[in-house]
Image (tube, rainbow, N blue to C red):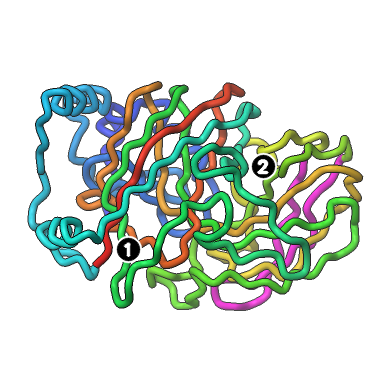
Amino acid sequence: MLTTHSTRLERWLGASNVEHVSQAMANWYGPPIAVAGVPGEVYATGDGDFIGQIRAGWEATWEDRARDLMHRLRRGIRTASYSSKSTLHSLSSVADIISKATAGKSRTFSFNKVGPTGVANVTSTLWRVGPQPSAGSTPGGPPAGRQVDQTIVGAFPYTLPVSPDQQFFVSAFVLGSVAGNTLLLYDRIFDIAPNMNSSATQAVTGVPLRYQNTTGGNPDSIDGNFLFFEVGGTALAATAHNWTVCSYNDQTGAAGAVPLLTGNASAIVDRLDHPNNQWFAPLAVGDTGIKALTQLQLSAAVATGVCNAVIGHPLAWIPVPIASMALTIDGVMTAFQLQRIFDNAALSFLEVVKPSTTATTYTGTFTTVSG
């Protein structure tokens, strides 16, 4: 796939947002991640580059288009700009999508996340904040942890499609109160709350139920499953610590170990217990995803505080280039390409590498169609 035209991408999203995603993707080990809200098919890659075609940015910017869409909405005009493109999904065409939607197979999910005060150049989790969906619950401790699904408090609740139907993302509107932030939409597949007041090894036996296919390239492939550590409802004590000897099974099922990850003394709630500019735990060289955790360990006992180890699967980058203006996301004719939302998916957001400490509120909707 060809490299994306950088000038057009910067004109569409803004140079700062493009740079933000590029830096966040440095050292990424998984497959390219779709960039939402960009006409065409644009993906961010592990070297911080962008690939795919952008069908915008010659003259009009994202802000220009958003204003035009708002103007059309105020006039009550509904437009359809999609062609009859065929897909590799059970939804065969745009006409089929419309047919399924009008037959009652569409769902609209609303969200309102009042984000926490952050730390500049550090990632925050929006799992624990509400009000919609409500603040996420705390997982259980070792060894079992928790297989996260749509029934867990904090996930978007929904009724599963009737078999053999599958659910696909088709559109979204996202608005942020502060410009320059970037969200990562991900499926939260497993979490566990280790004992922070211990430096002993802690076995993990729980295994995620989604994205467990060891054959690369499949929609449910392990490739891209990533690990992160989020501070829960209690800040960490002022104790220097590292995450050390954290073991896992990789994308083939073989054993691996996370290279040492430096934690943060006195880490505040809802931040990731990671170094600056790092939103995912590194993996052993050559590994592309985590099938399951097998062990966690801290280098020093942290007397107080809560921290969850989470396995997620990335779905898309969502840049927020302009404050208080909705970003329109097309899930059919862009890099989303009718991204499948697997049964029981627990969708959530990370606020990746915040450019400032300012708390940001995110409001919006996204729509899926089953077929």
Identify the residue position indicated by label 1 in the image: 167
* Whether residue 243 can be seen here: yes
Nearer to the camera, 142 or 107: 107
Identify the residue position indicated by label 2 in the image: 272
Q: Measured along the vertical axis of the image, is residue 62 above or below residue 295?
A: above
Q: Which residues are magenta?
A: 240-264
Q: Residues within 10 Å of mark 2 (few under 14, many from 20)?
A: many
Left or right of 316? Residue 312 is: right
Nearer to the camera, 345 or 85: 345
The answer to which quarter of the image holds residue 298 is bottom right
Nearer to the camera, 57 or 7: 57
The residue depicted at 69 percent of the width and 52 percent of the height is 138
Residue 139 at x, y percent in the picture:
69, 57
Task: Name the N-terminal-most of marks 1 and 2.
Answer: 1
Residue 29 at x, y percent in the picture:
52, 57
Q: Are marks 1 and 2 in contact (CB under 8 Å)?
A: no
Left or right of 340? Residue 154 is: right
Residue 54 at x, y percent in the picture:
23, 41
Q: Measured along the vertical axis of the image, is residue 223 above or below residue 299?
A: below
Count of labels in the image:
2
* Whether residue 336 can be seen here: no
**Which type of secondary structure does the marked residue at label 2 adopt?**
loop
The three-letter code of the residue at mark 1 reads: Gln
Q: Find out whether residue 166 is within the magenta segment.
A: no
Residue 13 at x, y percent in the picture:
33, 30
The residue depicted at 53 percent of the width and 64 percent of the height is 288
- Split into 4 quadrants, where in the image is the N terminus? bottom left
Q: Find out whether residue 243 is within the magenta segment.
A: yes
Nearer to the camera, 211 or 57: 211
The three-letter code of the residue at mark 2 reads: Leu
Q: Measured along the vertical axis of the image, is residue 85 above or below residue 78?
A: below
